[in-house]
Amino acid sequence: MKFRIRCVGKVLLVVVAIGVLGWVVMSLWNWVIPALFVGARTIDFAHALGLLVLSRILFGGFRGHGGWRERRHWRKWQAMTPEEREHFQTAWRSDRARREGE
């Protein structure tokens, strides 16, 4: 029973977040764009959601960069000995210099 309640709560949270983000995009668009560009029209909620999806596709996402991957790499770095860190940095620098030279 707790699993179902948690799932319903998460779904509800996602729906509310999408609604709020759509409203924010619509409000910002209608506030800024018509004032900046002559002939630009205001948009409704459906167009704001479409714009939100389009920006997600073009620019990558709503999450921050890295996420769990970044933490995993940090834990690996912390687990390395100073010699392993130095070897990693040397290899990374040489690979980077090789790529920049191409």
Image (tube, rainbow, N blue to C red):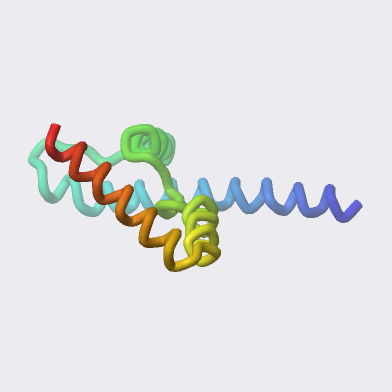
Q: Residue at x 20, y 52 (%)?
A: 32
Query: In the image, residue 20 lies at what x, y percent?
Result: 48, 53
Q: Nearer the viewer, residue 84 or 92?
A: 84
> Percent from the top left, x then y, of residue 77?
48, 61
Give the total of numbered labels: 0
Question: Which image quarter holds the C terminus?
Answer: top left
Residue for point 43% across, 48% down: 62
Residue 10 shown left or right of residue 2 in the figure: left
At x 31%, y 49%, the residue is 92
- Hey, which residue is sitting farthest left in the picture? 38
Q: Can residue 44 be seen in this view?
A: no
Residue found at x 42% / y 41%? 45
- Residue 90 lies, in percent from the top left, at 30, 54
Q: Position of residue 81 (x, y in %)?
A: 49, 66
Residue 91 shown left or right of residue 63 in the figure: left
Q: Which of 86 and 71 is in front in this view?
A: 86
Nearer to me, 51 or 94:
94
